[in-house]
Image (cartoon, rainbow, N blue to C red):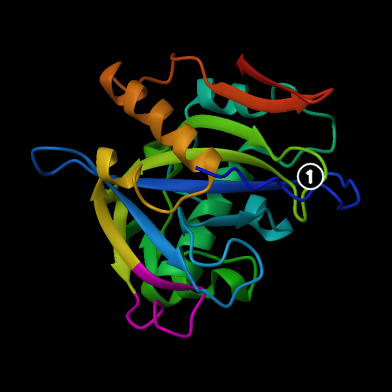
Amino acid sequence: MTTVARDQSFADSEPKDAATLILIDRSGAEPKVLMGRRHSGLKFMPGKFVFPGGRIEPSDALMPSLGELDPRAAAKLTQRTDASVPAARAFALATIRETCEETGLLLGQKRETPPSVPNEEWQPFAAAAIHPDLSQFHFVARAITPPKRPKRFDTRFFTADAQAVGHRIDGVVSPDSELVELVWIPLPEAKTLDIPTITSVVLEELDARIADGLGHDLPVPYYYMENQEFFRELL
């Protein structure tokens, strides 16, 4: 097989804080994860299967939730960061907002009264009276995009059970949207899809984590590159 050299002609840049959510359906005989296929016309990762997620927005830390992150997860989220890092809860809430925007799935619990939302980005949760609940989230990995890439992210990966979905907006995924297809797929099969390298690595980590009980006490792997050498550190 011919190996294609990666284009490293891009100017280096500071990675942007981002977060990604791996939804797991464990109602059947084997766990399945939710993945979406990106539109082939996009400049960034066209046609790749990915987890929903994106950059942290200022409003994410301001969105109220019924429950907060486990303190052990929150502590790991702030390790190896500088003073300007967003609040730990902002990372998990960003995945909830991005999952809604990209898939139409709203994670949280329905109540009679809507939540008080910080801006229009969170308005779908007020309209559906869905209140996010961060107590259902697990922090499973962190990875920084290597230098000299067209886009760089410092991404925190979370997982939550599919039962956390409290509402669905139809028509968000379509042939003309960012994600053109959603699939619930067993972990072994997900690893065979056209996925980014880091997605494959995180799926392996998630598989092992599920086998170990998916506890908050488990160490969280942190991937980064220094002096052209990759590192896997445990948080």
* Frontmost residue, 180 versus 94: 180
The amino acid sitting under disc 1 is: Pro
Q: Position of residue 37 (x, y in %)?
A: 42, 65
Residue at x 25%, y 55% (from the top left corner)? 184
Residue at x 85%, y 44% (from the top left corner)? 14
Q: Which residues are magenta?
A: 169-181
In this picture, residue 113 sits left or right of residue 234: left
Residue 63: tell me if it is visible. Answer: no
In this picture, residue 163 sits left or right of residue 42: left
Q: Main secondary structure of the magenta part?
A: loop
Quarter holding residue 119: bottom right
Q: Position of residue 3 (x, y in %)?
A: 60, 43
* Frontmost residue, 166 versus 232: 232
Tell me the residue that label 1 is attached to. 15
Q: Position of residue 110 (x, y in %)?
A: 31, 62
Residues packed near mark 1 inside 10 Å, few (<14), some (14 to 19) or many (20 plus) = some
